[in-house]
Amino acid sequence: MAVKVYGYDKCGTCRSTIKWLNTHQVEISEKVPLFETPPSAQELAELLALSGFGIKKFFNTSGEVYKEMNLKDKLPGMTQEQMLELLASNGRLIKRPIVTDGKKVTVGFKEDEFEGVWAKG
């Protein structure tokens, strides 16, 4: 199994994710720098569909850009398409890392979740 990781090299959570994947012999086929090349709205829609999560899980709610844009108050009035376009427009809004193998998706890093999704059984 090979995974694509959308992340940011200076992010501690992203580094922990890479370390976990390497330790568990999960091959990383591609590392996508979220800030420089955020996924398109279409890619995000596909990741969202695969994940089974609500779209809010994809927002970096603790990030400065999220707070500066006052998104906590704005998101409830937006359509999913508008939210996807907003995420695609600024990688700093996206919760990181996103890991996918094209069938499954995780957002953020929780070791117990990774054990269930990415550990080789």
Image (cartoon, helix red, strand yellow):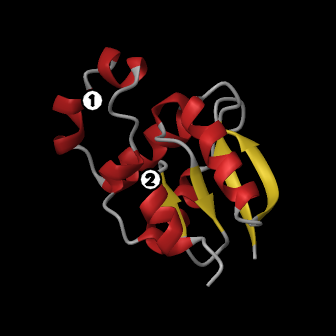
- Kind of element beneath mark 2: loop
Label number found at residue 71? 1
- The structure residue drawn at horizontal position 53% and vertical position 56%, both measured from the top left corner, is 44
Does residue 17 lie above or below 116 as drawn? above
- Position in image of residue 49 (x %, y %): 45, 71
Q: Where does label 2 land, which residue? A: 110
- Kind of element beneath mark 1: helix
**Amino acid type, residue under disc 2 in the picture:** Lys
The furthest residue to the front: 23
Q: Nearer the viewer, mark 1 or mark 2?
A: 2
Crowd around label 2: few <14 · some 14–19 · many ≥20 (10 Å): few
Q: In the drawing, does residue 63 fall left or right of residue 111?
A: left
Does residue 86 lie above or below 35 as drawn? below
The residue lying toward the viewer, choosing from 116 and 80, is: 116
Does residue 64 lie above or below 90 as drawn? above
Label number found at residue 55? none
Spatial separation of the CA atoms under disc 1 and disc 2: 24 Å
Q: Mark 2 or mark 1, which is nearer the start of the sequence? A: 1
Does residue 63 lie above or below 85 as drawn? above
- Position in image of residue 26 (x %, y %): 74, 66
The furthest residue to the bottom: 121
- The structure residue drawn at horizontal position 61% and vertical position 49%, both measured from the top left corner, is 40
The residue lying toward the viewer, choosing from 81 and 29, is: 29
- Position in image of residue 120 (x %, y %): 65, 79
- Position in image of residue 54 (x %, y %): 31, 60
- The structure residue drawn at horizontal position 57% and vertical position 59%, both measured from the top left corner, is 42
**Amino acid type, residue under disc 1 in the picture:** Leu
